[in-house]
Image (cartoon, rainbow, N blue to C red):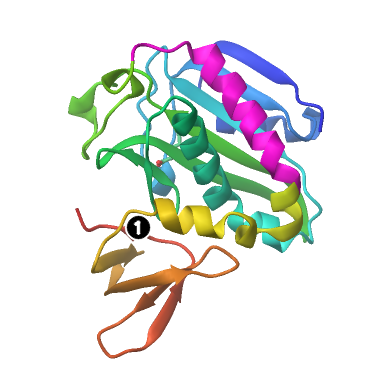
Amino acid sequence: MDTNILFFPEIDSTNSYALEHLDQLMDGTMIVADSQTAGRGRFARKWVSDSGNVHMSIVLKPDSLNYKLISGIGLFVAVIISRVLEDYKVSSQIKWPNDILVGGKKIGGILVESSIQGSVLRGLVVGIGLNLQLPDTSLISQPVTALCQHIPIVNRDEVVRKVNSIFFKAYREFSVLGVPSIRDEYLRKMKVLSKVTIQIGTSTITGKIRGIDAQGNLEIERDSGTIVVINSGEIIDK
Ligand code: BTN
């Protein structure tokens, strides 16, 4: 796939830009910004987006019928970011569905958004935030870390190029096979928790993680032995 990188010194949000210009942007385009004034995270949280960190979005225009790709893309990108970190000899863990942790602290996150018109998928936007330097932690409620705390300073553009090449090397296989193409690696890297509580909207479910299914849903076994399949939520155990 041809890739095209658009760079902005400052933007509101690379995801917002991609969604607003989806029709003009080619499949595979990357939007990169040095800083964001309105960076967004999952659950409508603010994403602190100081200059020098990685803020990027990848535009994907898969066939609307490619449910394998659509349902698992967030998990796939989590694996890609962990491979990028591995390339810098930094080992990371993934907290389902797609938080990236190093030493138990969050170093990066992924926000997948889609634009649907009627029954047609106009496109997917995969936003990636990765801390190379420590953001203002007083604004963040969870433990965070940055690449500079683990290795000497790295160049942001080099990291973006690595994300690009590692992503597109694996994307074709993923778009055909879906989550099974990365499942073993995902499970190996998944943060091990004996018992978890998952927040789903205003309710919670507690149980043991049993795995992830072919769509990337989390399989939880409750104390009663019932298996619950969860497609969206947040693990809230520390
Ligand atoms: C999360 O963990 O909550 C996801 C964070 C995603 C942040 C990235 S930064 C680039 C892109 N643009 C945004 O506004 N958000 C994503």
Quarter of the image holding residue 129? top left
Q: Is residue 71 above or below residue 13?
A: below
Q: Is residue 17 visible?
A: no
The residue beneath circle 1 is: 234
Q: Nearer the viewer, residue 78 or 49?
A: 78
Q: Is residue 48 above or below residue 81?
A: above
Q: Is residue 190 visible?
A: yes
Magenta segment, prevailing SS (helix, strand or loop): helix
Amino acid type indicated by mark 1: Glu
Check the picture and name the quadrant holding the N terminus: top right
Q: Position of residue 93 (x, y in %)?
A: 36, 45
State the residue at coordinates (35%, 26%): 48
For disc 1, the neighbor class at 10 Å (few under 14, some 14 to 19, many from 20) is some
Q: Position of residue 227 (x, y in %)?
A: 40, 83
Query: Which residues lie in the magenta part?
Result: 152-172
Quarter of the image holding residue 108? top left
State the residue at coordinates (37%, 25%): 131
